[in-house]
Amino acid sequence: MAGQLEGRVALVTGASRGIGYQLAKLLAAEGAHVVATARTVGGLEDLDDEIKAAGGSATLVPLDLADMAGIDRLGGAIHERWGKLDVLVANAGSLGVLAPIGHIEAKTFEKTMMLNVTATWRLIRAVDPLLRASEAGRAVFLSSGAAHSCKAFWSLYAATKAAGEAMVRSWANETANLPLRVNSVNPGATRTAMRAMAMPGEDPDTLPKATDVAAAILPLTLPSVTQTGGLFDVRKNCFLAYRDPE
Ligand code: NDP
């Protein structure tokens, strides 16, 4: 049976492990050619092996998203090879540090903002024309419940995810009259390296696996999506309402 993304091209950032890795595998299993990017070549190669063993195809792009010109070049390379992009999964992210706001080092603040916000913007800018060129462009930004819960010590990470969501909502409003659909997703606590870093005392076996979370996110990448500018909550398995300003 043909996959739901046969003949489509999907770009996944942070594809070397965790949620991005699993989502990349699922996209390939649906027939998409996956452009997988991250810094860790070993993780990307493992992904490539798994995708190929299952009969799929991928292009690996080792890239540090701190390299803004590299992001632009990636957009250019996708344009040259395919002339369009059907799916963007903006998944790469960093926790930065959990600390009282007055204790966050400037370097950590800037690095985390750069990856979670600036690189996400740069990526969107690089591929926006390519997604518009697709007959059913879909973009998904991995946000976090932290953007809304704003718990003590999570200020840096929370601010980056809130910024990302705001950017994505504006982008959705800019493109609402196009076939393009762009949404944020809150995966909820997931059994990955990032979660282990945030909650070292937690038993990972109590958390949903990245494979299951990725499976819940996959539908947001499919041509059947109608919603744009929304926030999908994996745990609740539905879109949450954003409140309009009063
Ligand atoms: P992981 O830490 O397991 O994976 C993060 C991915 O981002 C890795 O593939 C990593 O690749 C990539 N990445 C990190 N820094 C860079 C960089 N400078 N350049 C390029 N790639 C980079 O995270 P998760 O899978 O847990 O998280 C995925 C997304 O989901 C993130 O945006 C996270 O904020 C969000 N999220 C996760 C939750 C959880 O409980 N796990 C909860 C809520 C949200 P490499 O190091 O090889 O470059």
Image: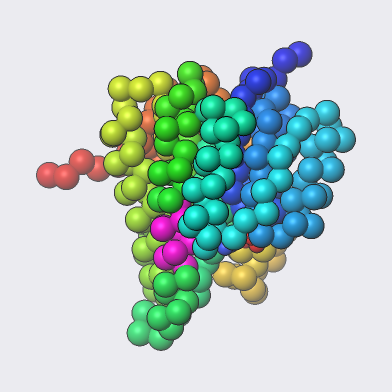
Could you tell me residue 203's position as x and y percent? 69, 66
Magenta segment, which residues?
112-120
- Determine the main secondary structure of the stretch shown in magenta: helix
Residue at 41% of width from left, 58% of height from top? 118
Q: Residue furthest left?
A: 246
Residue 5 drawn at (x, y percent): 63, 23
Q: Is residue 43 visible?
A: yes
Task: Choose between 202 and 126: the one closer to the eye.
Answer: 126
Q: How is the image coloured?
A: rainbow
Quadrant assignment for the C terminus: top left
Rendering coords of residue 190 (x, y %): 62, 54
- Is residue 201 shown above or below 132? below
Viewer-proximal residue among 30 and 9: 9
Q: Residue at x 73, y 29 (%)?
A: 29
User: Can you tell me which quadrant of the image ligand 1 is in?
Assistant: bottom right
Q: Position of residue 194 (x, y in %)?
A: 61, 63
Which residue, as the protein is rendered here, is positioned at the far front? 80
Q: Quarter of the image holding residue 113?
A: bottom left
| Residue 140 in the figure: left or right of residue 158 | right
Residue 221 seen in the figure: no
Q: Residue at image x 31%, y 27%?
A: 176
Looking at this view, name the residue that lies furthest to the bottom. 103
For the N terminus, the quadrant is: top right
The residue depicted at 44 percent of the width and 64 percent of the height is: 114
List the single residue furthest toward the right.
53
| Residue 223 is covered by the magenta coloring | no
